[in-house]
């Protein structure tokens, strides 16, 4: 009997010991620490998945533009004030979900003709290169008509000297006060849309953290890739086609 009492050191056989308040607080603190360590990693993993999905969208849009050019004597879609590029390329990508980046908190749509041009009205995270540095230098007399979408001028694949490093699609701004509905990224509009309309850091953790991360871009050769914040415009402006534009129109 004495041995039994000594073994349980004062506890009766079968009696359960409850946690004290201090022990519960310690356990809760440990769980909170572990959660604090794991949640950022989970957020980064989630954003990495979104970034991959977005770059796949970009690749599909880039290939759609290339297929369009193959069917139109090597020309990319016209700059139009009526049917814009989402409608012009629709037969090649065929699902407007491709126009939306999963990391875009506010994909904007444009209020145009939903009956005749439904793809142009779809929510959209991307904008196409306006190529206007090329036409400003090479066809200045028709530049205003081109910018107004009333010109037969269209960008030719053969006129892009560095297709691997020339952007055709990028991600547009989707945070206040710049909820962009722009279709075209124009270097010769205001201070340059590369300063105020494109999103250079959509894929960051947390999402859209100013000055960090990077964004996805489709290039004129049909490829797509992620570039770090500002890398698309400095030291070479990859939205530009001409040598002058690439070296002298770097965003500030």
Image (spheres, rainbow, N blue to C red):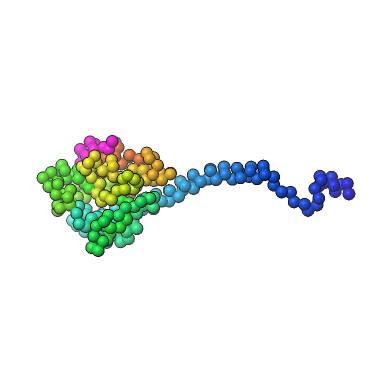
Give coordinates of residue 144: x percent, y percent.
14, 47
Give the quarter of the figure containing the C terminus.
top left
**What range of the chain is rendered magenta?**
241-252
Give coordinates of residue 225: x percent, y percent.
34, 47
Give coordinates of residue 207: x percent, y percent.
41, 45
Residue at 38% over, 40% down? 210
- The one nearer the camera, 222 or 34, is 34
Residue 152 appears in the rendering: yes
Is 209 on the left or on the right of 221, as rendered? Answer: right
Residue at 43% over, 44% down? 206
Q: Is residue 242 magenta?
A: yes
Give coordinates of residue 148: x percent, y percent.
17, 50
Q: Is residue 230 magenta?
A: no
Residue at 22% over, 41% down? 190
- The one nearer the camera, 45 or 190, is 190
- The one nearer the camera, 163 or 90, is 90
Kindly indicate the quadrant of the structure image that contains residue 141.
top left
Q: Residue furthest left?
A: 141
Is 100 on the left or on the right of 29, as rendered? Answer: left
In the rendered image, the vertical position of residue 250 relative to residue 148, given as above or below: above
């Amino acid at each position: 009997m004495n041995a039994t009492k000594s073994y349980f050191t004062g506890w009766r056989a079968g009696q359960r010991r409850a946690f004290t308040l201090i022990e519960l607080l310690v356990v809760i603190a440990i769980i909170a620490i572990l959660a604090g360590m794991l949640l950022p990693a989970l957020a980064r993993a989630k954003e990495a998945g979104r970034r991959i999905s977005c770059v796949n969208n970009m690749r599909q849009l880039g290939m759609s533009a290339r297929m369009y050019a193959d069917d139109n004597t090597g020309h990319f879609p016209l700059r139009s004030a009526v049917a814009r590029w989402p409608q012009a390329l629709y037969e090649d990508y065929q699902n407007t979900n491709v126009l939306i980046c999963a990391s875009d908190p506010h994909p904007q749509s444009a209020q145009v003709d939903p009956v005749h041009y439904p793809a142009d009205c779809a929510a959209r995270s991307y904008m196409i290169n306006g190529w206007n540095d090329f036409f400003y230098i090479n066809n200045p007399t028709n530049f205003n008509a081109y910018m107004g979408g009333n010109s037969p001028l269209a960008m030719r694949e053969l006129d892009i000297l560095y297709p691997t490093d020339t952007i055709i699609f990028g991600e547009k701004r989707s945070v206040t006060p710049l909820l962009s509905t722009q279709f075209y990224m124009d270097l010769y509009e205001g201070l340059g849309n590369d300063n105020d309309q494109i999103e250079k850091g959509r894929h960051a953790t947390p999402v859209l953290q100013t000055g960090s991360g990077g964004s996805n871009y489709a290039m004129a050769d049909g490829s797509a890739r992620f570039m770090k914040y500002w890398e698309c415009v400095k030291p070479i402006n990859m939205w530009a086609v001409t040598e002058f534009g690439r070296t002298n129109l770097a965003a500030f």
